Amino acid sequence: MNNSRIHHRRSIRLQDYDYSQAGAYFVTICVQGKECLFGAIENGAMMSNEAGRMMEKIWNGLTVFYPGVAAGTFVVMPNHIHGIIHFVGAGPRACPVLHAGQPRVGANGQPQGVAPTALSLGDVVHRFESMTARRYADGVNQHGWQPFCGRLWQRNYYEHIIRNEDDYRGIAEYIGDNPRRWEEDTLHPDAMPSP
């Protein structure tokens, strides 16, 4: 797999591509200013602190919060996360309840159940960022976690549409190996900026 493609953090979103359609997407979300807030790498393994463990818990809960979204391979790094998000289609709670082929309506004539919504990749990433930023701020206030300045997350994130099984395997391997390659990572705080 070409790692230069993965390390290039500028958004390469495809114009006119529907990022809510079923498929798998690789995302990288970085802490503002590359601050190492989620733990440290020791002997090639990520040693998550409480904040890092909170990130993992929220990632694994995406399926619960968002029907039709499944959280795939994931790693917390000291100052960023890598993960695969699967869009598997609308879940049963994403559509109104049908009665005799028609949406069930209440006494006021309004449909009952949740209206169909198509979350996009950007929606899921934004919600992950919002939930984790709020919980991280609570950790700062209640448990003395290292504070962050301004925003927890950088304004943009990297995404890649996973196109086939080989692509998927290469990305999953990259995610799993990321802690072992921390010293070479362009997101390492001591890394030289890209030209």
Image (cartoon, helix red, strand yellow):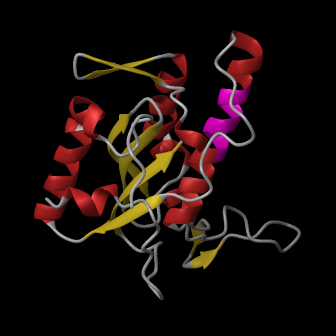
Residue at the spot 21% in from the left edge and 56% down from the top edge: 3
Vertical relation: 138 (above or below) 142: below
- Asked where in the image residue 143 lies, by quadrant, the reply is top right
**Residue shown at the point (46%, 68%) measured from the top left:** 11
Of residues 7 and 28, the one drawn nearer to the viewer in this rendering: 7
> Which residue reaches farthest left?
166
Pick the quarter of the image with the C terminus. bottom left
Is 136 in the magenta?
Answer: yes
Q: Quadrant of the N terminus?
A: bottom left
The residue depicted at 86 percent of the width and 67 percent of the height is: 107
Residue at image x 26%, y 43%? 175
Farthest bottom residue? 16
Q: Examine the residues drawn in magenta and state their main secondary structure.
A: helix
Residue 173 placed where, x, y %?
16, 45
Residue 17, given in percent of the width and then of the height, sits at 43, 83
Q: How many marks?
A: 0
Left or right of 28, for residue 95: right
Q: Which residues are magenta?
A: 130-137
Q: Is-magenta flag for residue 188? A: no
